[in-house]
Image (cartoon, helix red, strand yellow):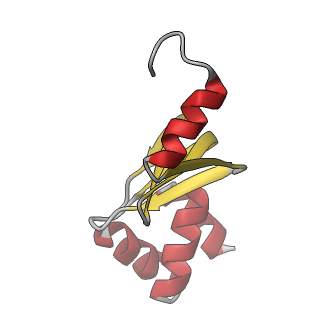
């Protein structure tokens, strides 16, 4: 930010540059990674920034990383004889291989 600049002037300058930002009221942000697993951001502060038609997001908060891969899903299927979709769903819900197997075994 530019020091000693009135917030209203800053908004005006941002608008002239084609930049707008708005806050998004979110409880949680989940990012699913290609290689398996997820990043979960709890209590996030999310800013949506639009610059000349392009949108981007700035996210800060408490980050947790869930790691699992195809081997975990295969093990759940082997132990519980459930479908792949059920295995993926319960693993995402629990974030824990052993807990997923226990829940599906009941």
| Residue shown at the point (45%, 59%) measured from the top left | 31
* Residue 81 can be seen in this image: no
Image position, residue 79 (x, y; %)? 46, 76
Left or right: 22 in relation to 77: right
At 46% from the left and 53% from the top, the residue drawn is 18
- Depth check, front residue: 34 or 80: 34
Closest to the observer: 97 or 69? 69
* The N terminus lies in quadrant: top left
- 77 left or right, relative to 82: left
The number of numbered discs placed on residues in the rendered structure image is 0
Q: Quadrant of residue 73?
A: bottom left
Q: Quadrant of residue 102?
A: bottom right
Residue 20: x and y, percent? Answer: 55, 50
Is any part of residue 34 visible from this angle? yes
**Image point 59% across, 58% down: which residue?**
94
The C terminus is located in which quarter? bottom right
**Residue 67's x, y, as percent?**
38, 53
User: From what the image shows, is residue 29 above or below residue 5?
Assistant: below
Residue at 41 percent across and 61 percent down: it is 52
* In-image side of 28 versus 72 (left or right): right
Q: Residue 84 at x, y = what percent?
A: 45, 86
């Amino acid at each position: 930010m530019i020091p000693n600049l009135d917030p209203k002037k800053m908004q005006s300058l941002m608008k002239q540059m084609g930049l707008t930002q708005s806050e998004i009221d979110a409880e949680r942000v989940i990012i699913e990674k290609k290689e398996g697993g997820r990043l979960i951001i709890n209590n996030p502060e999310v800013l949506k920034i639009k610059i000349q038609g392009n949108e981007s997001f700035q996210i800060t908060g408490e980050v947790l990383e869930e790691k699992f891969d195809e081997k975990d899903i295969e093990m759940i299927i082997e132990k519980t004889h459930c479908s792949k979709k059920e295995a993926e769903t319960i693993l995402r819900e629990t974030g824990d291989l052993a807990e997923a197997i226990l829940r599906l075994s009941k």
